[in-house]
Amino acid sequence: MVEGHSVHRIASRFRSSLIGKKFSATSPNGRFVEGARAIDGKVLSRMEAVGKNLFAFFSSHDGSNSSGSKDHEIEGDAGLVSGMWAVFNTTTEEPDVKPTTRLRLEEIVSPSSAIAAEHKICTHLSAMTVAHGDYSLYTSKKAALGEDPLRPDANPDQLFGKVIKSKKSIGQLIMDQSFFAGPGNIYRAEILFLAGVYPTTTGNNLDRQTFDKIWDVSVQLLRRGYDTGSILTVDATLDPSLAARGERRYIYNQSRCARCSGKVSSWNMSGRTCYACEGGCQPKQFLLPSTPPVKSKAVAKGKSNEVIAAVAKKPESKVVKSKRSEQPTQHVPFISHCAPVTIDQRLKEHGPERLTIKEIRSIIEHKVGSNALPSKSANKATYVQALRNLLQKESMLSTTSSTSRHLPPPTISAEDAAREKAISGENRAVEHIAELSREQATKAISVTPSPSEAKKRKKGRRGRDEKDDEAGVEKRKSTRRKLLHDNTDDGSK
């Protein structure tokens, strides 16, 4: 299900690049033929985002009549509830349509236009629900929706008046699109966490101050999602350490609260998983009694888009089963595609059980090669045990290596050692430098002093006369002659 911030991003992109352009319209999968026919050859004149719904307005004209006044005639529109509406800058970038592509728009360019055919704009719309009609389609849909935190015409006062009359929990109301238009399940968990409100607190027990906190957080988080294109709820100003270590969310699909490390509980609430921190971040006040879930009026009337989709696809037996898990229990994170957690993090926090077979195979193959992989027909338990054994073996090897540490690198190089022996007058037969060949040793002592020795000597003779005395010079010459004589003797032997 598309979240509200994503819908507003689509609307913004269309306004900046598509408004005022004429399009031909087709329905590649044949599921929006009438709608495509109604808007074919017309101009996209307006885009509106309301909650999780996107409305595109098409006109027979470019948006103005001969007198220059605005032409408000709406010939048709399309509402996006769930899916994708992608824009391609050129027809050369356009991918093949998919079985889910309901609507394809292609810019109509006049022969006299300077725009080349390959620079035309085209779009693909894939959506769960698409409708078309006159202007009343928009007004009726908008009237049925609640307040959108991202719309400038949102009325929180009106929303508060509805909330305090409801006996439903605030967790249910945030997911009810006739109350809060835009937030989804991830946003619900994070909004109530940051507002410090337990999800089962009833609407009629919320005071204005608490409601304002919920609304303000809703606006803040959805605006951040709109700006960044991602649901990022951890605030770097409030929790800089969490942001620094890469935390994206506080409690959604977490077993422990990112802020207080307290237990995160989860339970079924009207067909969706609800989350709460039990460590004190969300105090329990004015809670609903523990009763079996009752199908809400919003579901019966078709106001909650998310719940409709979930209930319509689930067999009755599964719905009944979910009723038996209403009591909060510590959440066991699942592999989420909406809010993914890295493989390393899942492996570190929960072990191989949290990985898919494909991920386990990839890790084993990377570490020890494909020969160590279990057979492809093996079940997940076999793969989990194989990876567990491999990790235990690596841990043992790591422990062994840490108890038998190697010596640190020597502080004096082999070249400096050879020079030191030559300067002291020691014959190479007494102690040779195993690291150097005869040629390397000869070359090393021919550079007097060595770079490192030069630094030491420079420090030692600060304030002294920098000229060497004749005795020192003669001593070094004698040392060189002696070393060369030794090398000649070695060669003769």
Image (spheres, rainbow, N blue to C red):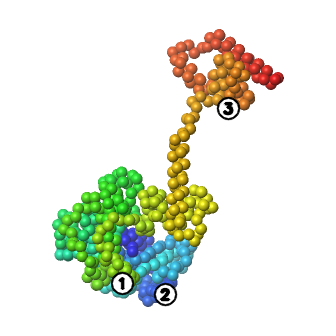
Could you tell me residue 450's position as x and y percent?
Answer: 63, 25
Viewer-side label of 1, 3? 1
Q: Do the residues labelled 2 and 3 touch (CB within 8 Å)?
A: no
Viewer-side label of 2, 1? 1
Q: Are marks 2 and 1 in contact (CB under 8 Å)?
A: no
Q: Residue 316 carries which label?
A: 1
Note whether 409 is above or below 255 in the view shown.
Answer: above
Disc 3: which residue: 435
Q: Earlier in the sequence, mark 2 or mark 3?
A: 2
Circle 2: residue type: Gly
Residue at screen point 21% across, 73% down? 289
Cα–Cα gap, marks 2 and 3: 79 Å
Note whether 19 is above or below 223 in the view shown.
Answer: below
Residue at screen point 63% across, 26% down? 416
Cα–Cα gap, marks 1 and 3: 80 Å
- Residue 63 can be seen in this image: no
Say what secondary structure mark 3 lies in. loop
Q: Residue 30 carries which label?
A: 2
